[in-house]
Image: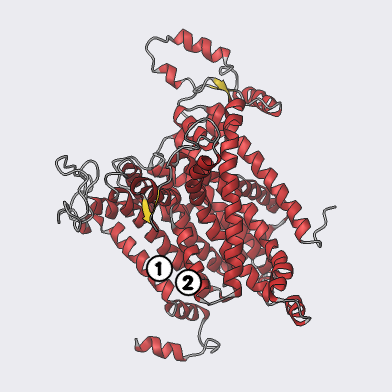
């Protein structure tokens, strides 16, 4: 499906050459023959598919390197960003959700609910710009410390420095997780509220289990079950968010590769990226299913 | 006011009160929903009457007055209450005009996605069988795929423009309706009134249009409201990436992209359009929450 849409596009990978007066029509024809572009579309598609199965996504026209290499080079940066954002989202989302469910209708609950509402309504890129404004352009002075965070890149120098890396990671991670923290905490809240009212929770409390243990051992595990579905459903959104976050923070990951490739009509990279992302999403869905079975013993895969 | 008090005195379970007026009454009692509705009305008025409200032309450049700060800050002038951008264009006028793009995109996307999605959901839920299997499979694939990225790719490849953006976002939004409407239809089709209509000899088309559609409408309307909010954010994201409407058309996302370059010298060029997006989206979301609670009290989260 992706393939057909991209192929139907005007322009094409040779567009940059067409505008160059030094390149004749004969050169173009030779180039398209060498690249196999003069063959019927379906032949191209199956050739492409066959190579993908073998792990070869083709050649990136704009970067002059194999697409597989371009993607693999940038994968760790993206995984670093997404991994930390994902961890933060789930951690904070679950925590906020539990707190506002236990203390329903308290000021803390209202605070979290309001925060979640803002988090869902705020455009990611605008939040990013405002953070950059506050922490990089202006810098915030609080308690005698001048807080300033780097606004771009993944590291200051090439050699590895953990503190420096973490400083670079803070803002992009917060930006990327905000919407997800909001979403997860809202969901966790309603799911926890439902669980709290069940009989087994009352039984556990009645037989003298401490409140903390009731919530964490009996409640949390059951309330997490529906959340796993939501997390799996929002994963594609995490990839999309990563693209925007990487663009704003000049993060050297796959998302920026994607955006650059868009500008250059570099189809091989676009296809490679989209296939890669689909693959990762499917893989994570599989993980979610496994989590299901672990959380809910009633689920049996036969 | 007296009407509200009188209405408040009537309990919800009075038989003579139809469910629609009960829903309206619940909505009127919800302060958050009222705020949301007010915001939506303001945005709608801005979009409809932009030429009358904005005192200056949103595209009038004035290169002698670029990057002027808002009026209340030293250096600002009263002619430009929110200041000017890098080409000396009035920010307030551009924000007012920008509401048009957001409104058009929001409504068109819901119209496209809603029509396709509700139809597909009704057919899948009512017909079951092979049709359902095919539709369910397509939605599964779409849900697992980062559609936003596909929308970005489509717009970039086909070329930016208002209708490309609408089509691309619309394409990503119909799946949600299918999911909700299909599930709803599945449970409704076993109910007595549907079975009765079928027994009375109503054609399938009539059952769907006259008996099923009105009953799934409230769920679809609630979803549609949230989809408007999503479309507005998505449109501004696309414009921000330079893949939205042409730069001459004022749009909130486009303004943010322009303002981004002047973040360190002229923060207001990025702050205000972003605030506009956030307030508009929040208004729609608040209204959506209110509608959900009012139309379907059991769905309350």
For the N terminus of chain B, the image quarter is bottom left
From this view, report whether residue A15 is shown above or below residue B229. above
Residue sitting at x 45%, y 61%: A118
Residue visible at 49% across and 75% down? A107
| Disc 1 residue crowd, few under 14, some 14–19, many 20+, Cα 10 Å | many
Q: Is residue A209 rendered to the left or right of residue B29?
A: right
Question: B135 or B240, which is in the foreground?
Answer: B240
Give left or right: position of A267 versus B165. right
State which quadrant residue A291 falls in. bottom right
Residue A185 lies in quadrant: bottom right
Q: Given contact means CB atoms under 8 Å apart, are the residues at marks 1 and 2 in contact?
A: yes
Instruction: Identify the element where label 2 is drawn.
Output: helix
**Which numbered circle lies on residue B49?**
none
**Is there one chain holding both mark 1 and mark 2?**
yes
Q: Can I make out residue B151 in this image? A: no
Determine whether the residue tagged by mark 1 lies in a helix, strand or loop.
helix
Which residue ends up furthest to the right in the rendered image?
A302
The numbered mark 1 sits on a residue in which chain? B
Quadrant occupied by the C terminus of chain B: bottom right
Q: Which one is nearer the viewer's eye here, A190 or A128? A: A128
Q: Position of residue B122 (x, y in %)?
A: 61, 59
The one nearer the camera, A8 or A86, is A86
> Which residue is under mark 1?
B36
Q: Is residue B67 visible?
A: yes
The quarter holding residue A1 reads top right
Q: Earlier in the sequence, mark 1 or mark 2?
A: 1
Above-or-below relation of A228 to A150 = below
Q: Position of residue B5 (x, y in %)?
A: 40, 89
A136 relative to A287 in the view: left or right: left
Q: Which mark is residue B290?
A: 2
* Residue at (46, 27) in percent of width and height: A264
Which colouring convention does the figure follow? secondary structure
């Amino acid at each position: 499906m992706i393939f057909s849409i991209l192929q139907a596009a005007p322009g094409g990978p040779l567009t940059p050459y067409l505008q160059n007066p030094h390149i004749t029509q004969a050169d173009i024809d030779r180039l398209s023959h060498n690249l196999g572009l003069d063959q019927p579309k379906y032949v191209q598609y199956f050739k492409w598919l066959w190579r993908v199965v073998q792990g070869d996504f083709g050649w990136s026209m704009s970067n002059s390197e194999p697409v597989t290499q371009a993607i693999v080079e940038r994968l760790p940066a993206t995984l670093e960003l997404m991994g930390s954002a994902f961890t933060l989202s789930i951690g904070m989302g679950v925590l906020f959700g539990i707190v506002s469910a236990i203390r329903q209708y308290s000021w803390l609950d209202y605070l979290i609910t309001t925060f979640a509402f803002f988090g869902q309504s705020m455009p990611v890129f605008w939040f990013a710009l405002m953070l950059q404004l506050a922490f990089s352009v202006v810098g915030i002075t609080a308690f005698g410390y001048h807080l300033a965070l780097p606004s771009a890149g993944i590291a200051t120098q090439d050699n590895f420095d953990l503190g420096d890396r973490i400083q670079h990671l803070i803002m992009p991670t917060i930006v990327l997780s905000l919407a997800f923290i909001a979403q997860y905490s809202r969901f966790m809240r309603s799911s926890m509220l439902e669980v709290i009212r069940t009989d087994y929770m009352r039984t556990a409390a009645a037989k003298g289990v401490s409140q903390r243990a009731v919530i964490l051992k009996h409640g949390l595990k059951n309330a997490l079950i529906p959340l796993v579905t939501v997390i799996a459903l929002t994963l594609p959104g995490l990839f999309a968010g990563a693209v925007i976050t990487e663009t704003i923070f000049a993060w050297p990951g796959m998302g920026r590769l994607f955006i650059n490739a868009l500008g250059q009509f570099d189809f091989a990279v676009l296809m490679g990226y989209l296939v890669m992302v689909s693959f990762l999403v499917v893989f994570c869905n599989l993980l979610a299913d496994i989590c299901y079975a672990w959380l809910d013993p009633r689920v049996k895969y036969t | 006011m007296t009407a509200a008090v009188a209405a408040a005195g009537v309990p919800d379970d009075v038989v003579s009160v139809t469910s629609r007026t009960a829903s309206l009454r619940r909505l009127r009692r919800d302060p958050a929903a009222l705020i949301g509705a007010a915001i939506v009305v303001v945005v709608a008025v801005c979009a409809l009457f932009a030429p009358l409200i904005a005192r200056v032309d949103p595209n009038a450049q004035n290169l002698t007055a670029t990057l002027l700060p808002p009026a209340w800050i030293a250096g600002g002038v009263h002619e430009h209450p929110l200041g000017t951008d890098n080409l000396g264009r009035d920010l307030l006028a551009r924000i007012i005009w920008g509401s048009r793009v957001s409104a058009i995109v929001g409504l068109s996307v819901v119209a496209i996605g809603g029509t396709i999605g509700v139809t597909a959901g009704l057919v899948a839920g009512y017909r079951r069988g092979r049709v359902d299997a095919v539709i369910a499979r397509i939605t599964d694939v779409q849900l697992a795929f980062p559609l936003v990225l596909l929308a970005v790719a489509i717009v970039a490849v086909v070329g930016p423009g208002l209708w490309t953006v609408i089509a691309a976002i619309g394409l990503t939004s119909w799946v949600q309706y299918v999911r909700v409407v299909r599930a709803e239809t599945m449970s409704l089709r076993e109910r007595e009134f549907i079975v009765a209509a079928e027994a009375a000899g109503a054609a399938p088309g009539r059952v769907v249009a006259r008996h099923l559609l009105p009953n799934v409408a409230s769920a679809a309307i609630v979803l549609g409201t949230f989809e408007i909010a999503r479309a507005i954010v998505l449109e501004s994201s696309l414009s921000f990436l330079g893949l939205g409407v042409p730069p001459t058309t004022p749009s909130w996302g486009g303004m943010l992209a322009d303002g981004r370059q002047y973040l360190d010298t002229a923060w207001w060029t990025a702050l205000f359009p972003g605030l506009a997006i956030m307030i508009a989206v929040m208004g729609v979301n608040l209204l959506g929450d209110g509608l959900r609670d009012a139309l379907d009290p059991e769905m309350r989260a």
